[in-house]
Every structure is written in structure tokens, then in C-alpha cells.
Image (cartoon, grey):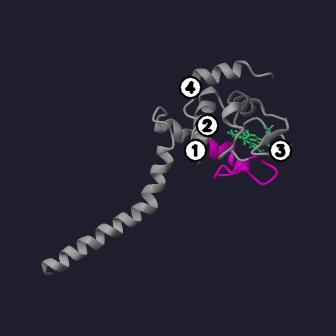
Amino acid sequence: MNTHKIIKNTFMYLSLFALSCLVSCGDKKAEVNNTSEEIATTEFLKGKKLYEQNCVQCHRNDGKGMGALYPPIAGSDYLASNVDKIICSIKYGSNEEIVVNGKTYKMPMPPSMNNLNDVEISDVMNYILNSWGNKVGPIKLEEVKTALSNCNN
Ligand code: HEC
């Protein structure tokens, strides 16, 4: 192989790597970078798993919800100002009419199937508050506990 060919091949491999990284590394980074640095990655990933076990049926993997039935969490204008209420809904369910991004949702949300404990609710909250472009920021376990002690149930 002459030098010219080696340089050409090296360049080709480097661009291939860069290209595949643009596709796959970018995704992974976006997901983790989305979380505030104050949320440990392990907690965030635990929250993601809990979301997949308890919430995807209605709110879907992409957080976009299901048409007129289940509201989107991704890009929800309801989220940031109703954090305490949502914590209570995860624990006890909710049967209120709510408006999310201008649309009214009337279906009830059941209590989490696996009866999530305080730590699990905190993990799943950190996941939804900081995924799919949501940037509400981290929530502390203490804040979740306080919200839970103030639910009207
Ligand atoms: C059986 C379907 C169903 C499941 C499962 C479910 N939800 Fe909901 N969720 C709803 C409905 C319906 C509403 C709107 C009515 C209400 O809040 O009373 C809602 C409202 C919400 C809201 C506030 C509105 C918004 O979109 O910003 C959030 C946040 C939310 N759910 C998160 C979760 C999380 C987290 C889980 C899992 C722990 C979960 N939900 C499980 C149906 C569901």
C-alpha cells in the first residue's frame, strides 16, 4: 500500500466512524445530556425503566401520549406548574379534567400499577421532567415526600 492509499483509507474510516457516531452516539448523548447534571445517571435510568413498566401503556415511549385519550408529557405545558399534583396522581391516581397544550383530557389516570414507593416516584419524576426535551430540572426525594404528605386523598 502506498502512503497515499493509507491516508485515503484512514480518512475513509474516520469519516465512517464520525458518520455512524452522528447517528448513534448522538442519540445516547442527547438522552443523558438532557438530564441536569445534578441527576445521577443511574437514577435517571432507573426512572426510565420504571416509566417503561408503569407509564408507556398510555403516555408511550416517546412521551407523546395517545391522541385525545392520554395527554403528552413531552413538551407538556402542564408539567412544570403541577409537579406536586402529578406526584400525587402517580401514587393515588387522578380523575380530573385537565388541559394540556390547549387540549382537554377527561380520562382517569390510575394509581401506578406496582404501587411505586417514594424513591421510585422520585426517579420516574426525574425521568419525565428531564426527557424528550423537557427541562424542568431535578427534583429531590425530600420534595417528593413533602408532596406525598400533602395529597388530598
Ligand atoms: C391508563 C393510562 C395511564 C397510565 C398507565 C399513566 N397515566 Fe398519566 N395520565 C393519564 C391520563 C388520562 C391523564 C390526564 C387525566 C388526569 O391527570 O387526571 C394523565 C396525566 C398525567 C400527567 C399530567 C399531564 C401531562 O401530560 O403533563 C403526567 C405528567 C402523567 N400522567 C405522568 C404519568 C406517569 C409518570 C405514569 C407512570 C408512573 C403515568 N402517568 C401512568 C393516563 C395514564
* Crowd around label 4: few <14 · some 14–19 · many ≥20 (10 Å): some
How far across and down, in percent of the image, does residue 62 sit? 63, 52
How far across and down, in percent of the image, does residue 42 sit? 48, 38
Q: Quadrant of ligand 1?
A: top right
How far across and down, in percent of the image, does residue 83 sit? 68, 30
Pointer 1: what residue?
131
Q: Earlier in the sequence, mark 3 or mark 2?
A: 3
Q: Are marks 2 and 1 in contact (CB under 8 Å)?
A: no
Residue 122 left/right relative to 71: left
Q: Indicate yes or no: mark 3 CB to ligand 1 under 8 Å.
A: yes
| Amino acid type, residue under disc 1 in the picture | Ser
Q: Please give the range of residues in magenta.
A: 51-71
Badge number at residue 124: 2
Q: Earlier in the sequence, mark 2 or mark 1?
A: 2
Q: Earlier in the sequence, mark 4 or mark 3?
A: 3
In the image shown, does 117 or 3 lie closer to the viewer?
A: 3
Task: Find the residue positioned furthest to the front.
Answer: 102
| Amino acid type, residue under disc 4 in the picture | Lys
Residue 5 left/right relative to 50: left
Q: Earlier in the sequence, mark 4 or mark 1?
A: 1
> Distance between the Cα atoms at labels 4 and 1?
17 Å
In the image shown, does 48 or 126 lie closer to the viewer?
A: 126
- Secondary structure beneath disc 3? strand
